[in-house]
Amino acid sequence: MGKLYVVPTPVGNLEDMTFRAIRILKEADLILAEDTRTSGILLKHFEIKNAMQSHHKFNEHQTVENVVKRMKAGETVALISDAGTPGISDPGFLIVRECIRNGVEVQCLPGATAFVPALVSSGLPDERFCFEGFLPQKKGRVTRLTQLQNEMRTMIFYESPYRLLKTLTQFMEYFGAERQVSVCREISKVHEESVRGTLTEVVEHFTKTEPRGEIVIVLAGKDEKEN
């Protein structure tokens, strides 16, 4: 019986790649990559020349059965996404679930995940938090925001720079203009930046300064004193 390794890759700086991740990728019989072009750059940098196959949200239902068969036949497979830990707002859950159903061992290596540094550096309470990932774009968005209005834990969201102002403005409506927030962008890259303050202050900042790059929003939970 083979094995599935879930391998985190850097969200920015290539120096964040672990020695173990490099070794596993070099030893794997097959590397499943969200985007083979993006991952090809990473693999070339670390001189990894193993077989690679595309595995993303549009084809994972078609490919997972064959990949599981290969592992049951003894092959080792490594799963990577474009950046960070697979399965966290990225493809990964489906193949992990199918491996477990088929008795194939799954190991997830510790490593880069964008929301952890964003949370820790936000200055907001981090002993308890909830990860929301990307909010629904249309259907279900208002329902989800309404459900979160009484959430007392720190909340974490992923967002596109093109939708950031819309999302922050909606947060003002649902959570109050004075709610504390930290917007962290380009984590681990040259232009990494965290903008902290009230929702009003952060909206004002990004109204004047166009947001760019990958973005994590860390929003304070509801205070016990709030009505």
Image (spheres, rainbow, N blue to C red):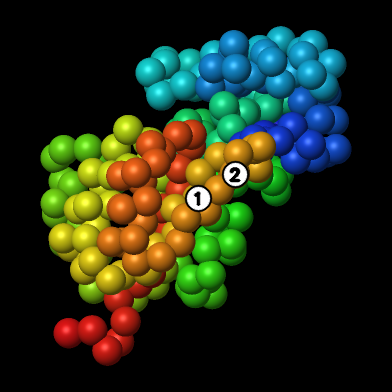
- Callout 1: helix, strand or loop? strand
Classify 49 as above or below 211.
above
Q: Specify the quadrant that holds the N terminus.
A: top right
In the depicted view, which residue is nearer to us: 157 or 22?
157
Position of 180 relative to 106 (above/below): below
- Residue at (73, 25) in percent of width and height: 76
Say whether marks 1 and 2 touch (CB < 8 Å): yes
Question: What is the three-letter code of the residue carrying label 1?
Answer: Cys
Residue 122, x across and y down, in percent: 52, 63
Between residue 16 and residue 36, name the one nearer to us. 16
Question: Seen in the image, is 139 located left or right of residue 153?
Answer: left
Q: Quadrant of residue 23?
A: top right
**Pick the front one: 179 or 52:** 179
Q: Residue 196: x and y, percent?
A: 45, 61
Looking at the rendered structure, the kind of residue marked 2 is Glu
Are there few (<14), some (14-19), or many (20+) residues within 10 Å of tag 1? many
Answer whether residue 177 is visible to the viewer in this image. Answer: yes
Residue lying at 31% horizontally and 70% vertically, measured from the top left: 179
Q: Residue at x 75, y 40 (%)?
A: 16
78 up-or-down from 114: above or below: above
Q: Which percent across, then down, holds residue 184?
A: 50, 50
Name the residue carrying label 2. Answer: 192
Q: Which residue is mark 1?
A: 184
Quarter of the picture containing the C terminus is bottom left
